[in-house]
Image (cartoon, grey):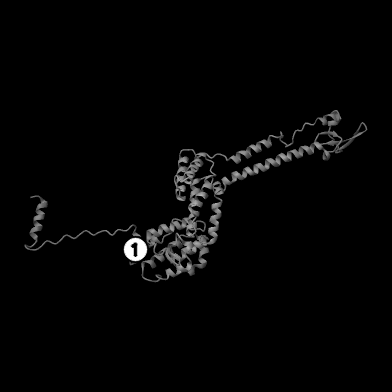
Amino acid sequence: MDPAAAAAAAAAAAVPQGAAAAPARPAPVPVYALTPGKHNQNIPLDYTNGSGDIKLFHKGSSALPVIYDGTNPETFLIAVWDRSLAFSWESILTIPTSNGVKNLVKEHGQIPTSDIIAEVSTYKGQPTRKAQNCQMMYTCLRASIAPAKQADLDCDFLEYDQEGPTFLKYIIKDANNDTAAAAISVSMNMIALDKTMHSLQHDVKSFNVHCQGQFRIREQLGQPINNTDGIAYLAKGYGEVPVPQFTSYVEAKMNDHSDGTKTLTVKDLINLTTIKYNDLVRAGLWNLQPSVDVVALQCQLDAFKAQMTIDKKHKVKVKDKKKKERFALEAWAIKPPTDGTLTMTKNGKEFKWCSHHKKWCNHTVANCEAKKRTTNAVEEVDANAAAIEHELEGYFSEDSQD
């Protein structure tokens, strides 16, 4: 008999006759949770010694990957929302208001601070998971603020008494991101999207990220930009890209949208243009061409510079036949004065030294008409050239700023 059969027979013999065999214990059924923070998310965490919940609290309250410094409220809020999804903060970020239930991260501009304080008071100090999450969130936010900015926020530290949602609202206010001024700022930014495209050096991907941030702010304020206006704003920016393959692509999409062939949303247009931009860059076809205005200005500048031949001293060579007829260029006539005397009498006539003609004439250099004509001509050409060069610098400086 093989060993396995022998062991089975021995086990059967050990059971008394007439006694039923004990039923097999069922394997434990795993409790599903999307993340550890969502496991038993309505049950308070157990912070007793050795509990895994202690580690959960430390992870949830650790600093976010984005540190708030006063200039990055949008990316900071995205990081807060990601952390809330992982550690079940959604319930404390859901705030009842007179206009319905609102999400503090996505709709903060529609939630008065008083409503947040009122909601927090319903669970603050209670032995509940929401109270624990409130503390976890506050600890996380405090750890996610740049030291210099922390000093600014500390002036009102006691007002929020370690309340996560209320402190988040204060951070958003600090960024001036949920006020009427923010809405006006967004509107002004959308109107100037053509300049934004230049300042981003025609980087369509960065441009689209900028626009998404502006649209998101308006949504958070409860004043979303409608689809028609949003597409028009985007098209204004795309029209400034000096890449024919890209602009013709956008124009075709806009035509399809206008005639109803294929309706676009703001999201569609942003996604399509980002993909097209990436494709052209990868193919080595993102070749920025100078705009028509720049080319025209350059041609105009070249024309002005070609009006006259200017020597290294910026003097114009003027042909004046009359000056050759005034008197013969005898040796004495072109010999400059050596004793500082600028007048002389020769053959009963008075002559004056003209440093412009470099000879003795019947006029001083101050009254030299030829010098005046030369100076005026040079100044006119230089002024016109300088004006055009300044305008050209304006075009190119827009591409190099920020």
Count of marks placed on residues = 1
Instruction: For label 1, count other residues whose C-alpha is less than 10 Å away and answer few (under 14), some (14-19) or many (20+).
Output: some
- Name the side, left or right, on which 43 lies relative to 279: left
Extreme residue toward the right, this view:
348
Extreme residue toward the front, this view:
259
Q: Position of residue 190 (x, y in %)?
A: 54, 52
- Name the side, left or right, on which 201 lies relative to 366: left
Viewer-proximal residue, 231 or 362? Answer: 231
Q: Which residue is mark 1?
A: 41
Specify whether residue 73 is in view. no
- Name the side, left or right, on which 74 lies relative to 306: left
- The residue under the point 47% across, 40% down is 280
**Callout 1: helix, strand or loop?**
loop
- The residue under the point 88% across, 37% down is 343
- The residue under the point 60% across, 44% down is 395
Q: Position of residue 272 (x, y in %)?
A: 45, 45
Extreme residue toward the left, this view:
17
Viewer-proximal residue, 218 or 342? Answer: 218
Quarter of the figure with residue 308: top right
- Residue 91 drawn above or below residue 307: below
* Amino acid at the residue labelled 1: Gln
Q: Position of residue 69 (x, y in %)?
A: 50, 58
- Residue 8 drawn above or below residue 294: below
- Residue 10 drawn above or below residue 252: below
Viewer-proximal residue, 220 or 59? Answer: 220
Specify whether residue 223 is in view. yes
Q: Position of residue 208 (x, y in %)?
A: 49, 49
